[in-house]
Image: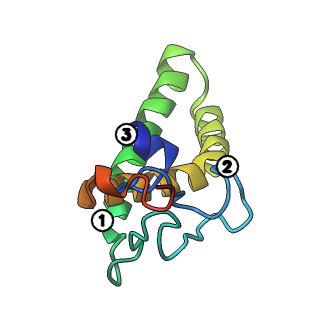
């Protein structure tokens, strides 16, 4: 689970899944083709990350519902203010959620291989 949140290679847990830091808006969607440590292919087939869209959609759907319900019903904010804040939060978190969904998806498909962990460091 920590590997998914750290956005590291699922096979060796060392290489980064993305070229830039997590909250970087410079090249936010660029991924290297392979892991620099174990050479795991990050793009195994065309449309591979299609499943990540479903993960993102489910997560964001629940997040948006709970966020607006909390601010509207618990804190007593108006509906327009609750949605306005939601939009602002979603703009800030968009890149993170996109990356997290891809990290979860590749971790579902590719399993950890301890023999690859120190591939280039041995």
Q: Please name the residue shown 37% across and 54% down the image.
A: 10
Give the image's coloring scheme.
rainbow
Q: Does 83 sit above or below residue 70?
A: below
Q: Which residue is mark 2?
A: 23
> Residue under circle 3?
62
Identify the residue at horizontal 56%, vertical 50% (top origin): 96
Q: Position of residue 67 (x, y in %)?
A: 49, 31
**Residue contact at pointers 3 and 1, CB within 8 angstroms:** no
Nearer the N terminus, badge 3 or badge 1?
1
- Residue occupying the point 39% across, 69% down: 40
Q: Which secondary structure lies at badge 3? A: helix
| Residue 56, picture quadrant | bottom left
Q: Earlier in the sequence, mark 3 or mark 2?
A: 2
10 or 91, nearer to the observer: 10
Above-or-below relation of 7 to 36: above
Q: Is residue 78 above or below residue 53?
A: above
Residue topped by disc 1: 51
Q: Pointer 1: residues within 10 angstroms few (<14), some, or many (20+)?
A: some
- In the rendered structure, the answer to whether residue 18 lies left or right of residue 54 reads right
- CA distance separating discs 2 and 1: 22 Å
Q: Position of residue 6 (x, y in %)?
A: 50, 43
């Amino acid at each position: 689970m920590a590997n998914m949140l750290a956005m590291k290679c699922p096979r060796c847990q060392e290489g980064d899944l993305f070229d830039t830091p997590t909250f970087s808006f410079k090249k936010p969607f660029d991924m290297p083709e392979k892991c620099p440590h174990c050479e795991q292919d990050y793009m195994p087939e065309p449309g591979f990350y299609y499943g990540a869209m479903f993960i993102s959609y489910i997560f964001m759907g629940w997040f948006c519902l709970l966020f607006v319900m909390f601010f509207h019903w618990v804190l007593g904010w108006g509906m327009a203010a609750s949605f306005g804040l939601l939009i602002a939060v979603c703009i800030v978190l968009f890149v993170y959620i996109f990356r997290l969904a891809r990290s979860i998806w590749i971790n579902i498909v590719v399993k950890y291989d301890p023999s690859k962990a120190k591939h280039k460091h041995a």
